[in-house]
Amino acid sequence: MSNAHFPILSLMILLPIAGAVAIGFCANIKLVKTIAVAAASLGLAASLWLVYSFNPDDGGLQFIEHHAWIPSLHVEYLLGVDGISVLFLPLTAILTLMSIVASWRSPTHSRLYFSLLLCLEAASLGVFSALDMVLFFCFWQLTLPPLFFLTGVWGLPALRRNAASKAILVSIFGSLPLLFAIIILAVNHAMQINGHLPLDLSFSFPVLLETQLPDHLQGIVFVLLLIGFATKAPLVPLHTWLPQVAMAGPAPVTALLIGLKLGIYGILRYAMTLTPSAAVEYDWLLGIIGAITLIYGALLSLQQSNLRRLLAFASVSHAGLVIIGIASLNMQGIQGAILQLLNFTLIMAVLMLVAGFIQHRLGSTDLHHLGGLAQAMPKLTGFYFLFMLASIGIPGGNVFPAELLLVLGALQAHPSLGITALTGAVLSTACLLAFSRRAFLGASTRANRCANQDLRPRELILLCLPLLLMLFGGLFPNCLLGINQKAAEVWLTRLLDQPGMEGDELASWTGAP
Amino acid sequence: MLIPLLPMLAAVVIVGGLLFGVLPNGRHENLTTDIATGSLTLSCLMAMALLGGDLLGKNHGYFSTGQWLSSDSLVIRINFTTNGLTVWLAALWALLLAVISRFSIPALRQTGGLHRFCAGLCLFTAALMLLVLSANMVGTLFGWLLAETGGYFLVAQAYQRPQATENATRVLLTQRLGNIGFLLGISLCYAWTDSVNWAQLQASAPELSIGQATGISLCFAWAAFAKAAQLPFTPWLGRTLDEPVPVSLIMIHVGVFLIVSLDALFMQSPFARAVLGLVGFATTLYGFIVGKTQTTQYSAWLFAALAQVGLMFVECAFGLWTLASWHLGANVIVACLQRLTETDARLGSTPPQRVVGVRWYLLSLQHFWLEQITDWALVKPVRGLAQDLSYVDDRIIDQMIGLPSTGILPIPAFAEESHPAVTMPIAQSSGLAGKLTEWLSALLHWFEERLVLRHSSKQTSTYLRQIGYIINQFELLILRPRYLVLFVCITFLVAF
């Protein structure tokens, strides 16, 4: 672990909050937007500096910030990142910046809207950098109010109330087992050191990693954490809020929501490492959940006639793919999962933004109102096809190396899961191609009437940023893999190098003869 | 490296021009043409120079420019093979594609969409060069997938016509099925030889057991069958007739290239060679019979080329690798030049029945119903399953979670048979917890009302009959063929 000389993580969290507060004192909407973009840009710059300063050869935690928060309960303000979490910070910053820019022209968005977007960014950054479980839980919960209001106030009138309520209720339902698991972990720490409650409670993630959790508790905590994070991932059957929010919420908000895979990050970061024995023991369960989610999401995508709903189900499907990668418990699987989380979510978020552009122009993203968009909006169609093809794993795009690693990892560990992943990839291709054909190609229908509404310069520039990132991730995947290589090794060692694990069992996971 | 890179750069420049409005439709076509033909010509010249170097013995045989991806022991380098069959084929295909670009671009000026065509052709050329020259499987897969994408755009050149786009989608999806075999092959190679380089696989082939060699061979054979339009993947080839240039004719030969370049591996597995031979022979027969009954020149040539490709697989099965290589080169030249130099025309009025017999004639007219069989065996069950799952998601899971979405729900496969649910909510609630409470309350209420207070009554028997009806419906549902097949698949997957 290395401590931070400069509190860069706190600064990253505070910048959007400062922006949100500044917006509160500003009446001019143009100035509000400028402040929002400035705050998001500064956050992005800070996150890029963080990545630049990050030492990839150190598999431990870096940029640690440690302050006492509630001393009587040993709750601390503890922040830090490692190779697994560090890249999620710039991703969050980029997605927020894109969402703000994409919302620029909408006349209905008030200053509260931009404030809430910045608050959501701050809370998400907190989730990715918190190392104290209570602090993590606080940030986790703080993502809910902005989401509720953004969807409930600026969503489609007919659907927004239900969608916002449902997203919140499901998330709160997931928070309960999460909180319960955190309490069990903290109490267990006190019991392991023969201490007294509440004086010897510990919520510190590094401390809990070193604390032995009895076998009978490992399974319980693992399942509780899994349920808690599955609601946000989302995994089947707790996924139903996402398609609803995708239909009802403003497209930039939905893009941000799809892009921030907080739930899967939670599984990767906390559920697996805090309960390593249970994670290895119930690895098959995780794999089956991933496989079901993958195929279920892909099959439901085939049935969708609305682009936003389709993208939501495609996102659910790919969450399943990432879970399969995590369940592989090998380097290719875990690195592929991290890469997929970063790359695919970026692509899905951009596709959702493109869906928002279509919604803004035509008033709908439903197939009944689309058709032949390529003739009326060639630039928009071109960008859509580039990102769509990247999402199905066409080489050159950033999803290809991630899926390659994931599939190879899954096939090495569980051939059946690998074959399921390949089947899911074909189904995803089928649904996206079939929809794109009917919506964008063929004879134009309504789109002809708005032939002069192709992408505007600001939108073009907005889409260029993810396009460059997509090409960079596809052509130079080693740059991203190099950052998380050591951390992934540490993660894997923690799971597979346990005292109780037998040699032949370990060999079966690592593939050694 | 420049051989695939130049056409790729040309494709990127043209696509960039299209995206940013620099190359609007119908304008600056000369610039696009110059970029495309220039890059293809340069690429062709460099491929020729590489071939010359190989003939003079100047090439080292291997060229690497760095690492693309590494994870644990998996290291994928950007490396190329610079001798042998790959160099010959690279030169041949680069030449053919350069000639194709010269022939076809003037015609495309009249039909429109020249920018898209040039971008697609450059992309296809780059992919083909990468596929042929790459020294590792992932590089070949890179080109393999990009070639499919280039082919997709070329088949969908007339994208305003729904049939063209449907054809393109079908072609791409069929080939994606074949990619499963390619990825499985890479995975098995990595597991058993700890490498993804072609040379390493060929060198390790004698040390592999027959089972291992058969496993890897069958995986790559599956990929090759899909790419070469062998049975049962043949229907995609018939859907490429509208493409402006004969890239599909080249594409079907790529499958043979894959098999020929794995000769040492296939020699280790008699079973895999037998499969090659059987599939090749069946496809040859298919191509011969269907080709005889075609009514246009282009389609007749297409199936003739397919029959020849089937023969190449048969040659591979008998271990005649050199013959298959020469056959590959000769056939691709003849097929492409035929297509380029002759115009399409209706064939003469010779009664086809006299050529193949009435029964075969009827079969061949329908292409042996292969596409319909595929639809029935694969597409229809998947769609049915998706429809049923959609119903379950909307009507059961979504309702169970609470606050269900409103709007038009898809009609399920079994909606007409289902009865409306008989519910008497005691209290309105939302969310899982709320619903659970409501259901528990309703259940207790029902128990007390119907069974405790009224004892046996007509109402009770009605409820029981309804439960029986629901159970019967469920049984009927799971006995549908698609669910039986699904259960069998799941059983196999779990056992695997």
Image (tube, coloured by chain):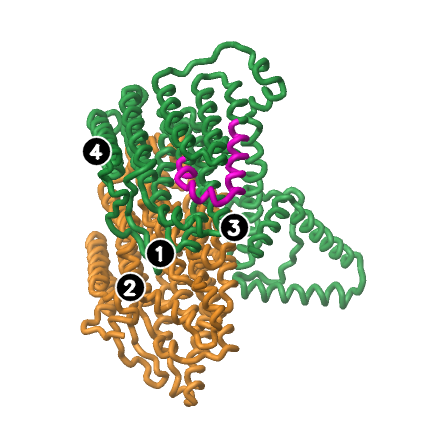
Q: Where is residue A93 in the image (x, y as percent from the top left)?
A: 27, 58
The CA span between labels 3 and 4 is: 56 Å
Sequence-earlier tag: 3 or 4? 4
Task: Name the residue carrying label 3.
Answer: B211
Mark nearest the camera among 4 and 1 is 1
In the rendered image, the vertical position of residue A395 relative to residue B190, given as above or below: above
Residue sitting at x 44%, y 17%: B297
Task: Name the residue carrying label 4.
Answer: B22
Quick one: B119 or A46, which is closer to the camera?
B119
Residue sitting at x 55%, y 35%: B375
Q: Position of residue B490 (x, y in %)?
A: 58, 52
Task: Name the residue carrying label 1.
Answer: B74
The CA span between labels 1 and 2 is: 24 Å
Mark nearest the camera among 4 and 2 is 2
Q: In which quarter of the image is residue B90?
A: top left
State the orange chain: A
Quick one: B31 or B475, which is closer to the camera?
B31
State the green chain: B
Amino acid type at image mark 3: Gly
Amino acid type at image mark 4: Val
The reply to whether callout 3 and callout 2 are in contact (CB within 8 Å) is no
